Amino acid sequence: MTRRDLLHRCGMGLPALALPALFAAESRNPLAAKQPPLQARVKRIIHIFMNGGPSQVDTWDPKPMLAKYAGRPIPIHLRTERRTGAAWPSPFAFNKHGQSGIEVSEIFPSVAKHVDDLCIIRSMHTNIPNHEPSLMMMNCGAEQQVRPSFGAWVTYGLGTENQNLPGFIALCPGGLPTRGTFNWRCAFLPGAYQGTHIDTKQTQVEKLIENITNHSVTREDQRRQLDLLAELNRSYARGREEDPLIEARIQSFELAYRMQMEAADVFDVAREPVHIRKMYGDTQYGRQMLIARRLLEKGVRFVQVWHGAGQPWDAHNDVKGNHSRLAGECDQPIAALLADLKQRGLFDDTLVVWGGEFGRTPTVELPAFGSNLGGDGGRDHNSYGFSMWLAGGGVKRGYVHGATDDFGFRAEQNRVHVHDLHATLLHLLGFDHETFTYRYAGRDFRLTDVHGLVVRELIA
C-alpha cells in the first residue's frame, strides 16, 4: 500500500488535501529559476580557469625588485615544496594602460585595453602548493573532502533561466583536467546540480555532445518513452522514503530530451555573424569563448571555461615560451568576450572571474626541472601569493586590491583567501555565505565551510 492509499483509507481528510502540493513539490523541476534571498548584483558567472597556475609576476603583478636581485637569493624565506634558486626577473615587459594606469604584462595586449573594467586582486593565497588540493579548494572550497563545486552551489541556489540547457556547464577541450569531474561535482547536493562537461576540442555539434540527435525514433516516440519511464520511477519512489537520486535521474532524462531542441543551436558558432567570429578568432579557444558567451546569453547560470586539460600553465620549464604561447591563445578571445558582453547589455549583470589554482615562485626552479635564468627557466608552485581578476557587475573597475611583498612571493597587504573570494562572489549573487547551506548527514554544510569574509573593498 502506498502512502497516498493509506492516508485516504484512514479518512485523514486534511492531510489528504495537502497531498497534491506535497507530491508536486517532490516532482517539480529542481533547476527552475529562483530569486536569491538578498539583493543580487549579478545573475550569472563565467569562470575563466587558467589551469595549472599562471605566474603572477609574469602577468598582473610587476616586481622590478627582481631585476635588482637577479641571479641572487632573495632576502625572504621561501617555503616551497621543491628547491628553488635565485631571483628571476620576468622576461616580459609591463606597461601602464587605461585611465587607471594599471600595469599589465605585454603578453596580454588585448585584455590590457579593458584594464579600466578589471578588478585585479594581487593578494590571493591558498593553503597547499599542489595542483590536486588547490584545484579542489578553488572549485569546491575544500582540499580533500567530498564537497559540491562552486558552480553546483550557484545552480542549487538560483536554478537556471533556460530549462532546455544545464544550469552549469564546464567547457574543457581535450579531455578532463586534474581530478577530472571532481572539479564540477555536486557531491551531496542533488544530481541535477552537477556540472555538464563539454569537450570543446570538437567542432561538430554531434561530437561536442554525444547522442544529441536520436536517429532511431521520432521525438513523439521519445516523449512517450520518457513519460512511461518517469511514471515507473515515481511509482517506485512513492513506495519508499523520498530519494533525491531517483528525482535526479528523472530530471537528467528530461534535460537530455530538452537539450536535443536547443543545444544544437547554442553550440553551433557558425550561426554567428562573420564579424563576431572574427572578433573571437577562429581558434579552439576562440570558439570555446564564443560558445561560453552564447550559453550565458541563453540563460545558463554558471559557465566554466578551462584552458585545456591537464595543467598547461604549469611552467616548471620555459616560462617565457609557455606563458607567451598560452596567453597568445586566450588574450584575443577574452578581450572579445568582455567587449561582446558590453555590446549585448550583459556585462553589468555578469561576473567574469579569471585565474588559476595558485601562482608561481619569483625564483627560478632548480634541477631536475630547469635552472637557466633565461631560455628554458621555469618557476615552481606558489600558494602564498598570486593574482586573479574580476570584471562585470558589482565589482570596482580599474582597481587593484592588495599586494604581495617586494618580490611577489607572499600576499602581505589586504590578503584574500579563496574562502574570502567565494564569500564575496556569493554576496554578489545575493547570498549570505554563512546562511546559504545544505543539510547533509546531520550537519548544515556551506561552500566556505567555517571560514570566509566578504571583501567589501572589491564591491562597487
Image (cartoon, rainbow, N blue to C red):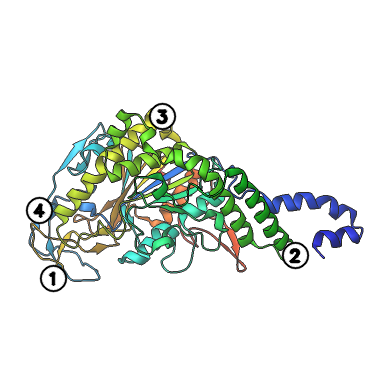
> Which residue is situated farthest in the front direction here?
216
Front residue (pair 84, 370): 370
Q: Position of residue 91 (x, y in %)?
A: 12, 51
**Is disc 4 in contact with disc 2, using a CB cutoff of under 8 Å?**
no
Query: Upstream in the sequence, badge 1 or badge 4?
Result: 4
Q: Position of residue 274 (x, y in %)?
A: 31, 29
Q: Amino acid under label 4?
A: Ala
Query: Upstream in the sequence, badge 2 or badge 1?
Result: 2
Query: Upstream in the sequence, badge 1 or badge 3?
Result: 3
Q: Which residue is mark 1?
A: 367
Q: Which residue is mark 4?
A: 67
**Is disc 1 in contact with disc 4, using a CB cutoff of under 8 Å?**
no
Front residue (pair 448, 336): 336
The dot on residue 239 is 2
Q: What residue lies at 85% left-to-right and 54% top-to-bottom?
A: 16
Q: What residue lies at 20% left-to-right and 38% top-to-bottom?
A: 109
Secondary element at image label 3: loop
Secondary element at image label 1: loop
What is the crowding at mark 1: few (fewer than 14 residues within 10 Å), some, or many (at least 20)? Answer: some
For discs 1 and 3, the disc positioned in front in the rendered view: 3
Q: Amino acid under label 1?
A: Pro
Describe residue 308's horizontal placement relative to residue 443 as left or right. Answer: left
Tell me the quarter of the image containing the N terminus: bottom right
Q: Amino acid under label 2?
A: Gly
**Is disc 1 in contact with disc 3, using a CB cutoff of under 8 Å?**
no
Alpha-carbon distance for marks 2 and 1?
Answer: 64 Å
Front residue (pair 169, 115): 169
Q: Which residue is mark 3?
A: 344
Query: Upstream in the sequence, badge 4 or badge 2?
Result: 4
Alpha-carbon distance for marks 4 and 3?
Answer: 43 Å
Query: Upstream in the sequence, badge 3 or badge 2?
Result: 2
What is the crowding at mark 2: few (fewer than 14 residues within 10 Å), some, or many (at least 20)? Answer: few
